[in-house]
Amino acid sequence: MSSTIAGEVARRRTFAIISHPDAGKSTMTEALALHARVINEAGAIHGKAGRKSTVSDWMEMEKARGISVSSTALQFTYTGSAGDPENPSVINLVDTPGHADFSEDTYRVLTAVDAAVMLIDAAKGLEPQTLKLFQVCRHRGIPVITVINKWDRPGRTPLELLDEISERIGLIPTPLFWPVGIAGDFRGLRDARTGEYVKFTRTAGGAKIAPEDHMSSESAAQQEGDVWAEAVEESDLMAEMGQVHDEEAFLAGQTSPVIFASAILNFGVRQLLEALVELAPPPHERAGIDATEREVTDPFSAVVFKVQAGMDSAHRDRLAFMRIVSGEFERGMVVTHAQTGRPFATKYAMTVVGRDRETVDTAYPGDVVGLVNATALAPGDTLYTDKKVQFPPIPSFAPEHFAVVRADSAGKYKQFRKGIEQLGTEGVVQLLRNDIRGDASPVMAAVGPMQFEVVAARMKTEFNVDVQQDPLPYTIARRTDAASADELNRQRGVEVFERTDGALLALFSDKWRLQYIEKELPDLTLEPLVAAAD
């Protein structure tokens, strides 16, 4: 059995795409699926007349705005140019929200992957959200492959972009492929390791896989002239500076392989898939809270990183996405829920592509499996068989926006409470309560205000409840304790709540109020909440 598991693990690559909003993340996700033959035609950009929505975005809000506000998991096989058709690689791609308001959801995803693709807009370079998510990857030891996207549009020079990566985040870029043609005139790629020219041909609307013509350096020079000569000169310059791929340095988080691409034209997408298969690490052991490690060949264990309801309007079920850490998963097996010690049946297990789902009978470390109607599970929970293991919980982001939420109609209080409790368990928002406000008016705490919009939209569509949201004048939260709560509640501009997980949070109107109370009442417990890169 262990040899079977080891073989399956070696085939698997589990990764996430991280980027700033509008860098083309969802388009790249679909382009990868197209190259793996999961779909026959790409649906490029959200909101364009006559175009399809990307397969990974299923919420009406996502389709309308052209953004991703939830994470989804796509699994597909990929043989590659040098692969074995009888033993293809298994790709687990966990798509993430791009908008900064949903950083917490992205952080949960980054606890479930072994590598990340950092997508950078060729015209804009490194942007705040990309920087923040990269720091999370660095903190968690996740190796990063960099893709300079949108090379089909006018942008900055390759050397300028790579210098920015090196200077701003201390990561040494090591180009695997160098663009032939400036940004906006994307003709193809020079393979930095072989010197070969990969020339791309556009397809109508970028809906199909872009044909590739492979030619020698001599043939490329004859066809492309000065454009090829410039690509060779710049690519060789990087090699002379020592910026060539080194697998050990990459896995240690010191370097990042770089590929230039255009997701919308499907240029450079195959090269990214090949790099993931060749360079990204397979699943590996994970430490439990007692510092023991669960090896991939040990008995089954998994960590829940995402809970999502409303993906199937016909059934209104709830999916808990788990990343398998060790052992073989078999549908129907009874596992133990580490947080409660109770048995959990896995009769309904699915792989999910957008809204489409298929029953999964077996799965291995690195795979992402959706458990249907898993009402007892929450992000960060551990499932296991045999010897107990419990993986560390997933920290919550420090919220910065707060609002009271209540049902428009008192007659729908039962549906309101059910919906709010569900969204809180999923982690759409953090829910806070205290005796003064009561259960009818819980307080939502969020990283960004768009999370409140998601709550309102889902309460309406899934529970048929219109809600009112009243912003609260707080901007900072600190963890406190019962001994400090009474005194804090007596202070102006401060209110203490209990979070769903039992933590006591003190909310402050602004940083000056917090600083004043810390100075005047130094014995009170006021601890910063754990953030992503802490």
Image (tube, rainbow, N blue to C red):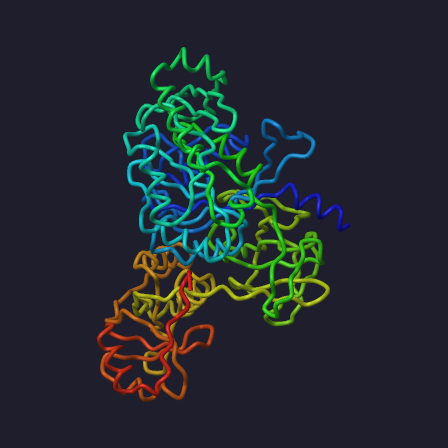
Q: Which residue, as the protein is rendered here, is positioned at the far top? A: 222
Q: Image point 43% across, 25% down: which residue?
A: 189
Look at the image and tell me in which quarter the C terminus lies: bottom left
| Residue sitting nearer the eye, 410 or 108 | 108
Note whether 152 is above or below 371 in the view shown: above
Q: Is residue 527 above or below residue 323?
A: below
On the rendered structure, is 244 left or right of 329?
Answer: left
Residue 358 position within the rendered picture, expressed as x and y whole percent measured from the top left: 60, 43
Give the image quarter of residue 474: bottom left
Q: Is residue 184 left or right of residue 255?
A: left
Q: Is residue 16 left or right of residue 13?
A: left
**Residue at (32% x, 44% y) in the render:** 65
Q: Tell me which residue sits at (46%, 39%) in the image.
A: 29
Q: Residue at x 41, y 32 (%)?
A: 260
In this view, 480 is above or below 194 = below
Report x, y in % for residue 237: 39, 30
**Where in the figure is residue 320, as x and y percent of width and height?**
54, 57
Residue 510 coordinates in the image, percent (x, y): 23, 72
Residue closer to the observer: 108 or 318: 108
* Furthest residue in direction front, as rendered: 240
Observer-nearest residue: 172 or 29? 172
Left or right: 277 with respect to 530?
Answer: right
> Count the marks: how many?
0
Q: Quadrant of residue 203?
A: top left
